[in-house]
Amino acid sequence: MISIDDRMAILDLCSRYNYYVDTGAAERWADTFTADGWFENPDGRSQGRDELITFAVGFAKQYPGAMHFTDNHLFEQDGDVVKHKCFLSFQIPSEGPPAIALVGYEDKLVQVDGEWKFRERLVGPLSI
């Protein structure tokens, strides 16, 4: 079982990830990943800092004003790696009610210089 301090640090990481991608802070969003970390969605994979920044810049242009809300966080210690799952409500503003996608994240996190970072982040349909 991971410590309360580590859980809180990972929850903070998830909040920073959401805030940075939603506000177009592409470089800060990329900083939530390890140097060789990757993000994958149904459209493809971005790996390493340059590809992550490119993804985040494109995301901000494609979904201006979109917001990520994560909840139901589960943690599992596996040596130096923490496996993390959570639900994502992704909301996109529109003329009428916002468009909402309900999906999930599956992550592997590691500490780099005492700070938790995503080594792997997969978003897609919820799985068990």
Image (tube, rainbow, N blue to C red):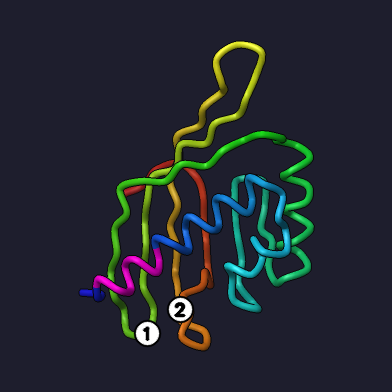
Q: Residue furthest top?
A: 96
Q: Quadrant of the N terminus?
A: bottom left
Horizontal side of residue 59 vs 8, given as left or right: right
Magenta highlight: main SS:
helix
**What is the x, y in percent for residue 3?**
24, 75
Residue 42 lies in the magenta stretch: no
Instruction: Name which quarter of the figure residue 107 lies in.
Output: bottom left
The answer to if 5 sits in the magenta stretch is: yes
Q: Nearer the viewer, residue 74 or 93?
A: 93
What residue span does the magenta drawing correspond to? 4-10
Where 49 falls versus 42 (above or below)? below
Residue depicted at 25% across the width and 75% down the height: 2
Which residue in the structure is indicated by mark 1?
80
Residue linked to disc 2: 110
Residue 6 at x, y = what percent?
Answer: 33, 74
Cα–Cα gap, marks 2 and 1: 6 Å
